[in-house]
Structure formats: structure tokens, C-alpha cells
Amino acid sequence: MSANPPAGASSSQSLAHIALFAALMAVLGLIPKIDLPFGVPITLQSLGVMLAGCLLGPRRGFLAIALFLLAVALGLPLLSGGRGGLGVFVGATSGFLFGWMFGAFACGLLMRLLVPRLGDTTGKGLLATSFVSSVVGGIVVVYAFGIAGLSLVAHMSLSQAALAMLIFIPGDLVKCGICAVVVQTVMRGLPSWRLGRD
């Protein structure tokens, strides 16, 4: 007899995980943001992006963030500071919002590629892999979109927009560390959790 769950059960579980991480993004949005002069606030929601990608895998991580952003587009005030509606997708943060989906995808893709090479999926190797995946997806990819968006909306050069983003890097590196610890904790508590799956 196969130990794998029925296809219907697996699909339902995937949908539940997608909805759960979309809800996590909303919860992280309740934590007050720190506004900066050039219109891009410091928030904890980028941590949710990293967690969705690292724990759900590329496709489901992408879909979890897409579901969250759909709710935002429909007017629900789920972004930090109670922001929502179509207007946020044409503001200074618009590049980051679109980048969140692809950042989650990149996190998940790296986890899928790197985790099978680990001998121990609960030790320091997993911690390092999760951290690197979070840096690449949650910082490099998200910032690429964010810098492009800020440059376009604020009429700044790409180099000026990139310099403006430097203030975020220390905090986002801390979030990468938190993400890595959470992923390791999940794997120790739920060893059946399959990282990088879709």
C-alpha cells in the first residue's frame, strides 16, 4: 500500500498551506511600519516572503504571496500601516510588492536545489541553506524589483535608488537569520515536512 496521501488530500493540504502563509503575511502587516523619507517603509512582511518560499517551495510560495496581493488589490488594508487597494501598486513600493512573489519563488527554488544535498536536514547545513536562500530571494531578487520600481516612480536613477535601499539591508539580513532559525525549528518539530516541494 502506498504511503503517499491521496491526490485530493494533497491538493487540499497545499491550498491550506497557501492560505495559511497568505494569512501570515496579513498578520505581519499588523506590526507598525517605520516610514522613511523616500516613501518605502520598513516592515516585517518581507520575512513572510522568505518563510513562504523556504517552507512551501517555489510554486506554492509564489501563489501564497500572489493570493495575499490579490486581497490587497481588492481593497483589504493588509499592508503595514493599513494600506490596500490598487493605488499601492503604482506607488513607491510597487516594485517591492511585485518582487515579493518572485522573491518567494527564488527562495523556494534554491531550497529545492540545495536541500537534497544536505545529509542532515535539521543541523547547521539547513540553517546556512535557509539563510542563503533568504538572502538571494528575499533581498537580491526583491531589491531588484524594488529598485527598478522606485527609480521609475520617484524619477531617480537606478544608482540613486540602489543607494536609498542600503538602509534596509541590515534589518533584512536579520530577517534572513530569523527565517533560517524558523525553518530549522519547523524541521526539528515536523520532520515529515518536505522542504522545496510543490
Image: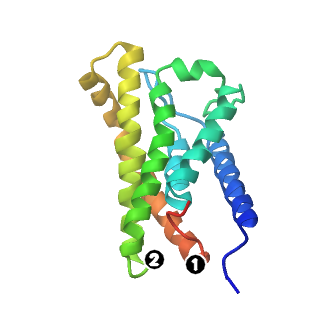
Q: Position of residue 117 (x, y in %)?
A: 36, 74
Give the residue type at disc 2: Thr
- Which secondary structure, mark 1? loop
Confirm whether residue 171 shows in the render: no
Residue at image position (35%, 20%) is 151
Which disc number belongs to residue 171? none
Residue at image position (45%, 26%) is 36
Residue topped by disc 1: 191
Q: Residues within 10 Å of mark 1 (few under 14, many from 20)?
A: few
Q: Residue furthest left?
A: 159
Q: Position of residue 40 (x, y in %)?
A: 46, 27
CA separation in Å, label 1 and label 2? 8 Å
Residues at badges 1 and 2 in contact (C-beta under 8 Å)? yes
Q: Residue furthest bottom?
A: 1
Q: Position of residue 1 (x, y in %)?
A: 70, 87
Q: Quadrant of residue 113?
A: bottom left
Residue at image position (38%, 76%) is 118
- Which secondary structure, mark 2? loop
Residue topped by disc 2: 121
Q: From the viewer's perspective, is 92 left or right of 192?
A: left
Give the residue type at disc 1: Pro
Q: From the viewer's perspective, is 54 left or right of 77?
A: left
Q: Which quadrant would the C terminus be assigned to in this image?
A: bottom right
Confirm whether residue 169 shows in the render: yes
